[in-house]
Every structure is written in structure tokens, then in C-alpha cells.
Amino acid sequence: MDRRELFHHVTAWFSANMENAETELHYDTPFHLLIAVILSAQCTDRRVNMHTPKIFERFPEASDLAGASFDEVYSLIRSISFPNNKARHLIGMAQKLVSDFNGEVPSEPGQLETLPGVGRKTANVIASVIYDKPVIAVDTHVFRVSRRLGLSDGNNVETVEKDLTSGFAPELRAKAHHWLILHGRYTCTARKPECSRCGLKDICREYISNNTKV
């Protein structure tokens, strides 16, 4: 099948099998989701969710976090990966929100990327989840699944993002991110993919290659 047909096939399968795909990070406000996404870098959502209730209670608004000390923030996230850097990023992010955005989380990815600790992936997550912007965040799961399914041949995040953006309709891009990340997290895993229960193995280049070798 050609590229258009491939995206149509993938979209149809996910629409039928993962209708309610959404972020697994717990949050109650855009600001709190931003905290959670920053903390989730190289850390599981499950571990982040274990810590965020206390963080959200202590810092309900950006102004609260902006005035916090490093030690206070560190004490709340010390068992999360890279707590030193993340504590600094969280405080800097909150201070930037207060000084430049009146304490509100901006909706545009470019503005989000001006915040400490916020790269392109995090910016796209916030823009798509909170503001339903037609952007796709590419993490390791999305990168892996996209290449296995043939949605992209890109060797870097930027190229994969470009291919997915052109392949998925604008109204589907926010959901497509969650389709791919959840599929990669629970089925199409890096080391031992669960091919036997994957409904997309018929188009998976890695599965086809592994099962046609002489």
C-alpha cells in the first residue's frame, strides 16, 4: 500500500481499538500538566503520578512555585530521575510564566519552548493535550512505532514529526500521539514487542522482516 493508504489503515485500526487514547499523566490544570510532563522526561508516568499530588497541593499556581527554594522542590521530587536539573527547571519555568505570561501556560509551542525545561516534545504535548493544537510530540515510543510501521523512515525526531504531521489529518494529530505512545508502551515495546497480540503486525516492517528470513 502507498503512504496515504498506510496512514488510513493505521488510523482506522487505532480508531477501532484505542478510541479513548489520552495522556496517562494525572493533572487538574494546564500548569500542573506542564509540571508533570517536565518530570516525566526519562521517567515513567506511573512514578510521576505517585509524586505529583503533593507537588500540586504545595504549588497550586505558578506564583507559588516561582517563589519556592531549590531544597523545597528537590525534597518533593528526589526519587524522580534527574531531580537536581528538574528542580531548577521547574522553578525557572514558573518564574518565566509569572514574568512573561502573567502566570498562565501559553498555547503556542514556540512560546512554550522559551520556558526552562521545555523542549519541542514537551511543548507539543502541552499544546496538543491542553489546547488541541494540531501538533505531534515525538518521544522514544512514537519514534520507534512510527518507523516499525513504516509511517516514517526518519532517523531523527524532527523528520519523524514532519512525516507524522503530513500523514495524519490535523484533527487527528493530538490523538495520534497517544495512539502511538500507548501502543509503544504496552504492545510494541523496544526489547520484546508483543507481536502476537498486535493488530498491526501485517504492516509492521520489523515483524515482516523477522518472519520472512530463511
Image: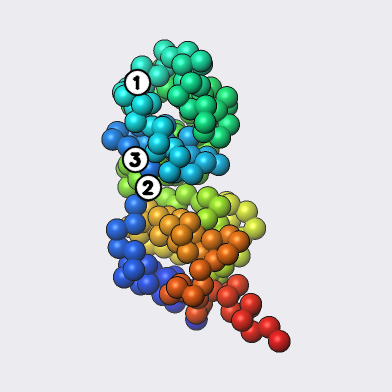
Q: Quadrant of residue 19?
A: bottom left
The answer for how far apart the CA atoms under marks 2 and 1 are is 22 Å
Looking at the rendered structure, the kind of residue marked 2 is Glu
Q: Which residue, as the protein is rendered here, is positioned at the far right? A: 214
Q: Is residue 77 left or right of residue 49?
A: right
Provide the secondary structure element on which disc 2 rests: loop
Provide the secondary structure element on which disc 3 rests: loop
The answer for how far apart the CA atoms under marks 3 and 2 are is 6 Å
Question: Where residue 24 is drawn, which disc sits there?
Answer: 2
Instruction: Tell me the residue at 48%/56% (across/down).
Output: 185
Q: Is residue 104 above or below residue 22?
A: above
What residue is shown with label 1?
A: 58
> Which quarter of the rendered picture does the C terminus lie within?
bottom right
Q: Residues within 10 Å of mark 1 (few under 14, many from 20)?
A: some
First-in-chain label (2 vs 1):
2
Nearest the eye: 52 or 155: 52
What residue is shown with label 3?
A: 26
